[in-house]
Amino acid sequence: MNLKIAVPDNKIFKPLYMNSESVSKQFNVTLLPMPENQVTEMMLNNRVDIALITPEGYGRGLAKADFRIIPGPALATTGYTALASMYFRRNLDVISSCSSPAPDDFLIRIGHKLMAENFAYHGELKKDSGKSADLLKNSESAIVYGSHDFEEVAIDISEEWFLTYEMPLPLAFWVCRNEEIPDDPRPVVEKLASAELIDEEDVVEYNGDDDSGIRRGILHWKWTDEMKLALDQTLQFLFFRQMLTAIPAVKVYGEKAPGEEEEGEEKK
């Protein structure tokens, strides 16, 4: 097996490919970290065999190729996670500008859509560098990774998603192309993940000794039927918010895809 694997070069996804060095030796794998928006293009151009991809990347890719989701390690959120936040200047009546160091990343774009949904901001998301405090010098709002110790008004994106839509938010999962599925890829993606990864990781925001108002959430690190349902619903959201041009089917490696026949089954 000689596999090339593309992954987003983003620390929030690192637990899913933490063991790349040892897996590289065992399976003859080459791991290629890159900007998130390049991962789908690498798959479509047959430059890699497997990719860690976002729901938006999956939807865009499936419009041109037959991607299959590899069940195994994945990432989804429920509630507060501190993965990314929206920041606002105080005492705003209307939000007239928003910036981010990573405006093309899926989680950041979800934050931007939530600002339109819940805070009536329909302007563009501009690229700017710096932490939240720096960004708010030039914009009235900002969307950044992490949860910073900063006194301005902040909203956790994954928590806002769950409060708005009452469903988990899938962030990344492994895919391969159906027409060129490598030898069973499941052992590879399983071993790529951190050995310390658990199926569900609790996230708690502590406020010193005061337990009032503590926010909680879950990082889901394994593909499940619940994540499959959440992905289907998320893809519909992306279509209706014009982030995708069609609603793609959720196709899983080893499972019969919608409209496909079982092996040996004759067409009627």
Image: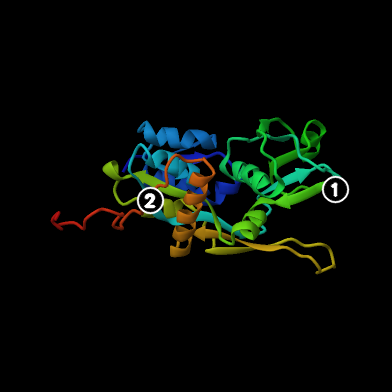
**CA separation, marks 2 and 1?**
43 Å
SS under mark 1: loop
In-front residue for pair 63/49 = 63
Instruction: Name which residue lies at 77% across and 47% down.
Output: 148
> How many tags in the picture?
2
Circle 2 SS class: loop
Q: Is residue 32 left or right of residue 65?
A: right
Residue at (46%, 45%) from the top-left corner? 52
23 vs 87, left or right, is left
Query: What numbered label is drawn on residue 80?
Result: none
Please name the residue shown 37% across and 31% down the image: 45
Whole-percent x and y of residue 61?
41, 39
Residue kind at label 2, given as amino acid type? Ala
Frontmost residue, 195 versus 235: 235
**Residue lying farthest to the bottom in this orientation:** 211
Residue 5 in sight: no
- Give the percent coordinates (x, y) of residue 208: 84, 63
Residue 253 in view here:
yes
Quarter of the image that includes the C terminus: bottom left
**What colour scheme was applied to this rendering of the protein?**
rainbow
At label 1, the amino acid type is Glu
Give the position of the N terminus as an image quadrant: top left
Q: Earlier in the sequence, mark 2 or mark 1?
A: 1
For label 1, the residue is 151
Name the residue located 56 percent from the left edge and 64 percent from the top edge. Answer: 200
Q: In the image, which is nearer the foreground, mark 2 or mark 1?
A: 2
130 horizontally vs 65: left or right: right
Q: Which residue is mark 2?
A: 249
Q: Report crowding for label 1: few under 14, some 14 to 19, many 20 or more residues within 10 A (C-alpha).
A: few
Disc 2 crowd, CA 10 A, few/some/many (<14, 14-19, 20+): some
Taking depth in this image into account, of 207 and 61 the one nearest to the observer is 61
At which x and y percent is residue 110? 60, 45
